[in-house]
Image (cartoon, helix red, strand yellow):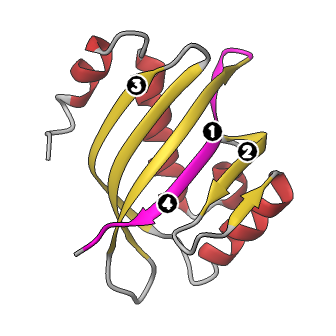
Amino acid sequence: MLPSLLIPALVMAAPGVDEGTFAFTKARLAAVKSGDLDRILALYDPWAEAVGSDGRLAKGSDALRARWAGLLAKGPLQVELKEISYVAGPDGVFAHAVIALTAPGEAPVLQHVTEYRVRKQGRWLLRYESFQRAQG
């Protein structure tokens, strides 16, 4: 795992990826840890799609709200960023992260998270994400 102090330097070195990309990652982690549903949903494009580790697709604001409400039903989730990488595309940024996600009263689950972020009106928003449990 890279020390968090090194991550901004790596982000800045990646062509097409700016400091706002890293700031968005930090804001996303903080929103999930807060357990604040509105704060989490504010990071999504209204037409975003998300595939959970159960394979179910949530499409649009209402479906994302229902999905996150279910995930947060027991309380705020703990999330630990294990690694992350970014690749800039013509219209946005792809991010791949490995996280340890822990629901209250449960053991941590290692997940691969793939995201596609777009910039709208000067801010990054999630357009697509996919969670997949890590094997082993």
Amino acid residing under circle 3: Val
Secondary element at tag 2: strand
User: Mark on residue 87?
Assistant: 3
Instruction: State whether residue 24 is above or below residue 15.
Output: below
Give the residue at x 82% y 51%: 60
- Mark 4 falls on what kind of element? strand
Looking at the rendering, which quadrant does residue 23 occupy? top left
Q: Quadrant of residue 64?
A: bottom right
**Disc 2 from disc 3: Cα separation:** 19 Å
Q: Which residue is mark 2?
A: 48
Q: Which residue is mark 1?
A: 126
Left or right: residue 65 compared with residue 30: right
Q: How far across and down, in percent of the image, does residue 93 sit?
A: 50, 25
Secondary structure, mark 3, is: strand
Sooner in the amino-acid sequence: mark 1 or mark 3: 3
Q: Name above or below for residue 51 compared with residue 53.
A: above
Viewer-closest of 15 and 10: 15
Side of 56 relative to 16 (left or right)? right
**Where does the magenta region start and end?**
121-135
> Which one is closest to the eye, mark 4 or mark 1?
4
Identity of the residue drawn at 80% across and 62% down = 63
In the image, 118 versus 27, the foreground residue is: 118
Q: Earlier in the sequence, mark 4 or mark 1?
A: 1
Q: Are marks 3 and 4 in contact (CB under 8 Å)?
A: no
Residue 133 to residue 34: above or below: below
N-terminal of the pair, mark 1 or mark 2, is: 2
Please name the amino acid that badge 1 sits on.
Answer: Leu
Mark on residue 117? none
Circles 1 and 2: CB atoms closer than 8 Å: yes
Q: Residue at x 64, y 60 (%)?
A: 36
Q: Is 67 one of the magenta-colored residues?
A: no
Residue wearing tag 4: 131
